[in-house]
Image (cartoon, coloured by chain):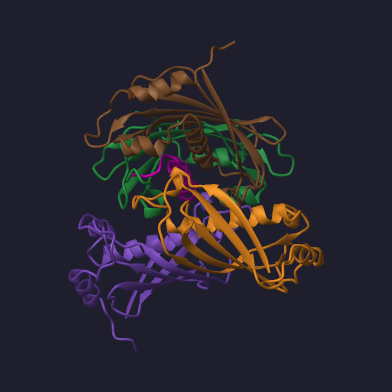
Chain colours: A green, B brown, C orange, D purple
Amino acid sequence: MITHESTLRVRYAETDQMGVVYHGNFLAYFEAARGEMSRDFGMGYGELEAEGIFMPVTEVQIKYLRPVRYDELITLRCMIDELPTRRLVVRTDVYGPDGRKCVEGVVTLAFVDRKTGKTVDAPVHFIQLLEANWKQEK
Amino acid sequence: MITHESTLRVRYAETDQMGVVYHGNFLAYFEAARGEMSRDFGMGYGELEAEGIFMPVTEVQIKYLRPVRYDELITLRCMIDELPTRRLVVRTDVYGPDGRKCVEGVVTLAFVDRKTGKTVDAPVHFIQLLEANWKQEK
Amino acid sequence: MITHESTLRVRYAETDQMGVVYHGNFLAYFEAARGEMSRDFGMGYGELEAEGIFMPVTEVQIKYLRPVRYDELITLRCMIDELPTRRLVVRTDVYGPDGRKCVEGVVTLAFVDRKTGKTVDAPVHFIQLLEANWKQEK
Amino acid sequence: MITHESTLRVRYAETDQMGVVYHGNFLAYFEAARGEMSRDFGMGYGELEAEGIFMPVTEVQIKYLRPVRYDELITLRCMIDELPTRRLVVRTDVYGPDGRKCVEGVVTLAFVDRKTGKTVDAPVHFIQLLEANWKQEK
């Protein structure tokens, strides 16, 4: 499996009048975390798009356990359990500054050919990248 | 069950560089649609907050079937299948201008006392409002 | 001059923890209002992009006079004082439900050729459209 | 004067279909940069709010010189030229990864008493904080 951690600081713009991060903004957080993971693995998502592969999100599941607040430095933990064929599933958990889990997300992405708009298999070098960073689960 | 339809026009700000509505923005669309539904039923969500009840989102599931694009007038169809006790589940489907379903969402909300931060039962008049708008499923 | 009015309903997602619309969101409101104006004048901005003309914003000035709140139905009044050559200046004022002015915006847009990335003159039919909707100032 | 630099990574969510950062999102970037500055100076904006002082934005001016793109690591340079009395003016310039200036922003903020909603003078310890970080201009 793959695990990857990154952090981000909550912006004022991301709160709502409930005084917490607006629930819709976590999708941008998850995506930022996937972006950090790709970059750390040596291939930014931008490069994939430049090669003609889009990765649209096809499915999302989120559980909100605890609120996240303005200015908190949160930790985003991405996990990939299975090498992708036509779909990549990335779980992302969000942890507050006190280490408690606040949000659980599961995002499914497809690989789509930019020209044809058709779903395609994950590019070979993308899979190799994941394999190179794969860890045996204990 | 309850069904309610409203429409909205996609803004440029809501697109991303894939040329379609950013997947995270549908949560704001669902919320706008729930807001229209409450208002049509005679009680804005703002009034609920004014009474000391917050309705935070506790769970979300989304399926993205087709992209939605800039300037499209989309239809949002909200559906409630069950009267709430401690949780309200609202399904919201998004239809494109051609009538084809683009996105399916299921959003679960809790009723929370603003002062104590504790989950409470749905207010009686909130349930009565839903009952007044309830239709027998054919 | 040209004046055009449209309305929009403030979404929860657009508030921040100050309990009012986040100041950055007015740029999306101004843009939505410009979009309504173009559509009412017979040419959506999307058509302009389809013809190969982008209209990036090059300058913005905003004054915030009064807060705007969740669920308010606000009125956006767009005004164009001068026919564009290479730049179009659109003022947009935001009025609250009580008719009081809340925000004043001035947005300058350029006409850019999508292929070359160079600034170009406003398309002739775009100017004709504005002329067709022009009113003598009293 | 005060100058402060911070960086941030552009998210996919922040782009629009023009393939660049949506012009309205820079206000959230400016605000994130002001937040980093406050924190580095020893008092987060959250603490100010906790003390009962809100700092709403009252005026904004932005010039867009060059586009900023997905995944770019941009530098935000905040500058304060004058100690505030009732208003604080913070300029923020955005630099691309190649060091070229992309956006110039000037944001004016007021100090508002949370209870009364009235504009007040900048808190003394806020001014002292700025003074402690003040540099003579060369």
- From the top left corner, tell me how far across and down residue C81 is, in percent: 65, 72
Pick the residue in front: A115 or C21. C21
- From the top left corner, tell me how far across and down residue A131 is, in percent: 50, 37
Name the image quarter holding the C terminus of chain B.
top right
Does residue A91 show up magenta in the picture?
no
Determine the image quadrant of residue D114.
bottom left
Pick the residue in front: D24 or B52. B52
Horizontally, is A68 left or right of D76 in the view?
left
Horizontally, is C73 left or right of D40 in the view?
right
Q: Give the residue at x 43% y 42%.
A: A26
Task: Classify C49 as above or below A96.
Answer: below
**Could you tell me if residue A42 is visible in this image?**
no
Pick the residue in front: C20 or A76. C20
Q: Give the residue at x 23% y 37%.
A: B115
Determine the image quadrant of residue A85.
top right
The magenta stretch is: A20-40
- From the top left corner, tell me how far across and down residue B130 is, in percent: 44, 22
Q: Characterize the magenta stretch by its predominant secondary structure.
A: helix
**Could you tell me if residue B111 is visible in this image?**
yes
Task: Classify A101 as above or below B89.
Answer: below
